[in-house]
Amino acid sequence: MATRKKIGILFNFSPKWLGGVIYVLNAVKVLNFLEEKDKPMIFVFYNPNLQRFVDEIDYPYIEKIVWPYPSVYKQFLKSLLLRKNTFVEEIIEHYKLDTIFPLHDFPVRSSSNCKLISWYADLQHLHYPHFFSLAKRFERYLRVQFILKNASHLVVSSHAVKEDFYRFFKIPKTMTFEIYHFVSIIDAFPTHTLKELQATYELPDQYFIISNQFHKHKNHKVVFQAVAELKRRGIKINVVLTGKLPDDSNSDYVEELKRILEVNQLEDQILFLGVLPRDIQLSIMKHAEAIVQPSLFEGWSTVIEDAIALQRPVICSDIPVNVEQLKEKGYYFSAENVNDLCDTFTQRAFAEATSPLYESYDTRVRRAAKTLHKILTE
């Protein structure tokens, strides 16, 4: 039997950035759908604050290693002074790895034979710079410049993100772009009935759902405004929200959402459920009339991937990445057009969609597994 490839997975995100956390978890879990002979050996090097996420990874050929990740700023300086990428050199040498992924930090070009694959989620800071502090924009700019200068492989989640890189940066001819459309891995498909959920969460009989964190670019605002406008027209719809409110109690965006809620007296139509166990969240999504994804910007939407896995219709903003993800299957509205969203809600074309709406779950995850395996091992 051929020796299994050794793949190092760097897992060092803030637990608050669920997009990055879910991306890495899915990258490992999807490899379970490879044929047995093709499954690589996975070494997950993780920050202890991600322990609860690491615990949920079930993969037959895996080592989970708590890694003492140093300060990014100090490590950048050390790498530049020593002229070697100290983020990964020790890991490569000790574990004899064939590949490392996803590598954000590329202060210098590495001479290692190990395949170092960088990843960048999106270039939102260039589309909506006012959503970021000057320091954060500069940090992102430097990180991208180092990747483009020193990396040879860069994985992005969509053609839309790749096009952004070519739009905003000069791309070296030596750079190989890889597109990996990650998919949602459903460990157990939801089985809770609507009545069971209503007993605990007081859900209405009919509702839409938004399952996003409360960042400004997620654009809950347009949905709140649409619910208020429909109420003025004598039409009542209900919206359920999951996700964590920002830790900053002084968030201007959350305060704006609360004002819309209070001024229009929408408290009985918009229900906040907070962060839920994964199986409960998926069950509530499964029973919704449709899943709403109103974002102003995405690199690739986890929520849409969940909806596809659950075979549920999606009402979403018509930004390029959503269209790339759903193609003709989406029910689109202009991202900041309240009346457009009202029309989408009331015309109810999504209610007439016949199941299955999308490719089967098994087909999609197996294709994703083969794509990722090829990126990591060839």
Image: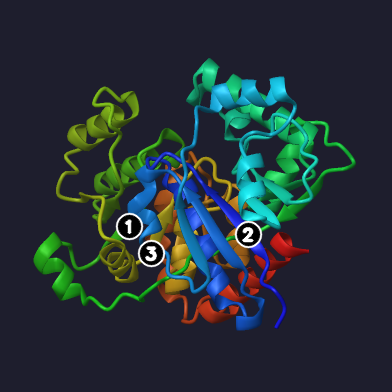
Q: What element does badge 3 sit on? A: loop
First in sequence: mark 1 vs mark 3: 1
Image position, residue 258 (x, y; %) = 23, 33
- Residue furthest top as drawn: 134
**Residue drawn at 41 percent across, 55 percent down:** 292
**Residue drawn at 26 percent across, 54 percent down:** 240
**Residue drawn at 32 percent across, 23 percent down:** 252
Image position, residue 264 (x, y; %) = 21, 37
Residue under label 3: 290
Q: Nearer the viewer, residue 44 or 272?
A: 44
**Residue drawn at 61 percent across, 74 percent down:** 39
Q: Is residue 58 above or below residue 316?
A: below
Q: Nearer the viewer, residue 276 or 109?
A: 109
First in sequence: mark 2 vs mark 1: 2
Dot 1 surroundings within 10 Å: few (below 14), some, or many (20 or more)?
many
Q: Quadrant of the N terminus?
A: bottom right
Q: Is residue 268 above or below residue 337?
A: below
Residue under label 1: 209
Residue under label 2: 7
- Mark 3 or mark 2, whichever is nearer to me: 2
Tell whether 153 sits left or right of 319: right
Q: Nearer the viewer, residue 136 or 302?
A: 136
Q: Quadrant of the C terminus?
A: bottom right
Image position, residue 288 (x, y; %) = 31, 66
In which quadrant of the rendered view does residue 276 lie? bottom left
Q: Amino acid at mark 3?
A: Ala
